[in-house]
Each structure stands twice: as structure tokens, then as C-alpha cells.
Image (cartoon, rainbow, N blue to C red):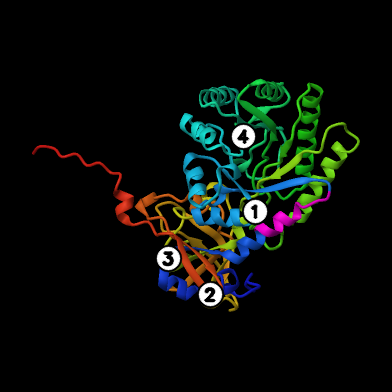
Amino acid sequence: MKSHNAERMSDRLGGCEASALAASFGTPLLVIDEAVLRSRMGRFREAFVRGGWRASVTYAGKALLLAEIARIANDEGLAVDVCSLGELETAARGGVPADHCIVHGCYKTESELRAAVERRVRHVVVDHADELRALSSIATETRTVCDVLIRVNPSIAVTTHAAIHTSAPASKFGFPIGDGQAMAAVRAASTEAHLKFSGLHCHLGSQIDDISTYVRAAQTLAELARAAYAAGIECEVLDLGGGLAAGTPADKPSPAPEEWAGAIFASLEQCFDGSPMRRPHVYVEPGRALVADAGTTLYRVGVRKSLPDGTQALIVDGGMSDNPRPALYDARYHAYIADRPDAQADGAYAVFGRHCETDRLIADAPLPDPKPGDLLAVRSTGAYTYAMASNYNRFSRPAVVLARNGNARVIARREPLEHVVDLDVVSEHDA
């Protein structure tokens, strides 16, 4: 049985050795390879350069938003989308100007809307009618003009896990198109004195590997833009969202950014060529596709045991508190023994975390006779791991390091136990 490893581990660890990283920073440890991250961002940016079109790539910060990651996205010419006041503040601490931020969210609080207006973000993506009214009220009060995109639900079913499907008829996101809500929102936004209606947004879901769904989404947005144009309203922006698959199994490679861009532009050219409408500014918002493959998580194997059904199992020093994705939606990963990346696998092993749940990270990892004390490296963990980490079982969140040219530096400290218990309030009772 051969290992899936096709390159040296250090090639995804910024030229660093796993053992040195573990010794310096401990485990579990999320390692972000800066060169891989910048390369992915640059490749997507270049893929959306097309003659006759304006296009912008936005980093979907929810995948992994630390101040240093936001700084890199800004350096690479990407805008950053944020979904909370915490994410907006993180982007600001990373040096991202407010007018390079796009504010998302299906339920934005009053304080989040106010911050977006007062800081003059590039766009607020409006998700429902009450939000549109609240935003108009805040903008009027502050004598500010707020730029908005209307998020629509195109009711396009995609082949992905139900938990990460955001455009089905039962999805909570956006204004439905079919019953007229979307067009009503466009009309309302375009008539508010302190709102500037700029265009339309949709997001289909995550881990999408069927490019044709984006073709349908582009056509759907173009049709709504055509209806708006007939009503005297121009859509300057069409935002197709993100969700492109990444970190998929080796036998099913993820779609290339050039393929994605080509399909979107070809679809929009059919819709707009020969039309009196001006070509819109095209936005896309990849997150996972930019950062997933830049990340590798290092664990220390603590236990090897044989289960009642004969499965050979490993238990590592992390698990669902630093990577809940396998438990949430059956995410799949590849793993390697970091100090023996080229060794021949002698069997398949189930890899478990040490939490009080099933907490299975990988069902069948081909590994070369793993033993307690070995370092296990899990690939493509840059997205939705640290971002979704918890303190389940009162575990501390792991450290995150940024590695390049054989050097690594901390960009998120390991959470101290004092921080984990700091919010507890203990009452003193009289004896």
C-alpha cells in the first residue's frame, strides 16, 4: 500500500521540518505555508483578469481570518469579506482598509450595521427586508451613503453536504427571486436616499466541484439584472460568491481557478453581449479554495490500539476542538507520519481525536507502522478548522504559525488555560 504523499512534507510547511516546528511550538499546531497561500491568491487573481471585463477577487475571511492572513490578502490585491464585528475588527488590525471590506451575514446586529456604515465599508450585502430598513435608518442618521448589494437566493441545488448548501429553496440566506422578493428589495434599495444600490450577490454553498452550477447562477443573476434594467435600475456589480471545492481527494482533483473563471465569463458574455446593459463588475469570493491547501495540522500520536472489530486505531492530542469538520459534515483528509513521509504504508489506520465523542478525524489513513510519539501531519487543514475551533472538554485552541523559507513565526498564540476558564463566575456561599 502506497502513501498518498507526492512531495516532501517540508514543501507544505514553508520549508520547515515538522519535528522542529513541534519542538518549538507544541502540538496540535496549524502551519500555514505563506508561499502556498500567496500563490493561490495570485493564481485566482490572475484567472479573473479578462479583456473587456472588470473583475475582483475577495477573500472569504470566514475560512480563516487572523490579522496576518488579512494582511496577506490585502497585500495580494484581494478585498476581504467579513461576517461579524469581530471579523471586521480583525481585518482592520491586519491593515485592510474599510473600503476593501464587504460585510456579509444573515443576521447583522445593530452594532455591526452601524460599524459598517460609520467605517464606510465597500459594500454591505443585505440579506432581508428589515435589514434594508435598519441600514437606511442608520445611514440617514449618520448622514452617510451606504453602498449595498442585494443577496438573492437563486434556488439552485448543488451537489454538496446539506450543512454547507446555501442556495436551495429552503436556505435561510437572501431574498427569493421567484416570488418577487428580490426585485422588491432591488427597488427599495435603489429609492432610499442614503443607500446606493450597486448590484446583486449570491452564494451557492461550499465544496462545489460542478462548474455548471456557477453558469446557472450567472445566468440567473443576469436575468434579474435585466429585469432591474427594464425598471430603470442598473446593476453595476454581479457577485457570484465562492464555494469552489478544495482539499478534495487525490482521485478527484478540485476545479482549477482558470476553469471557474472561464465558465463564469463565458456565461456572462452570452447574457450581456448585444444587450443595452453595460457589462457588470464581476466579483467572486473564494475562501477555502485559497487557504485550505496552505494549511497542515501537526498532531502527536498518543495511543495505538486494536478496536473490537479489528480496526487499528490511533488517538492524537487534538481532534474535534481544533477540527470539527469531520464530525459536522464528513470532511475527508489525508495524513502522513511527518518524520517518515516517504515510508511505505503497512495498512490503513483510523485516526481519532481525544475528546469524549467518537471524534474520528480520518477513517482509513494509509500509514507506515505508526507508534505513540510519532508526529502525524494532516494535509489541507487551512480552512474552517481554526476558524471553527472550540473549547470542548476545556481544550485550549491551538497555535497557528506562518512558515516560509525555513522560518516560522506565530500568528495566533496557543490559548492559555487561564483564558479558557477566565469567563467562569464562581459564587461564594456562606457556610
Pick out the residue farthest to the front.
143
Residue 422: x %, y % from top left: 29, 48
Q: Which residue is mark 2?
A: 406
State how far apart marks 2 and 3 are (Cα): 19 Å
Disc 4 from disc 3: Cα separation: 38 Å
Do the CB atoms of the residues marked 3 and 1 lie less than 8 Å apart?
no
Q: Name the residue tied to disc 3.
A: 27
The reply to whether the C-beta atoms of the residues labelled 2 and 3 are less than 8 Å apart is no
Q: Tag 4: Cα neighbours inside 10 Å, few (<14), some, or many (≥20)?
A: many
Q: Residue at x 68, y 27 (%)?
A: 176
- Which percent across, then down, holds residue 205? 65, 42
Look at mark 1 in the image and give the residue it sits on: 77
Distance from label 1 to label 2 (Cα)? 25 Å
Q: What range of the chain is rendered magenta?
A: 41-51
Magenta segment, prevailing SS (helix, strand or loop): helix
Name the side, left or right, on which 11 lies relative to 312.
right
The picture places residue 198, in percent across and down from the top left corner, at 69, 32
Q: Can see residue 204?
A: yes
Q: Which residue carries the number 4 mark?
A: 125
- Which of the two discs, 2 and 3, labels the residue nearer the N terminus? 3
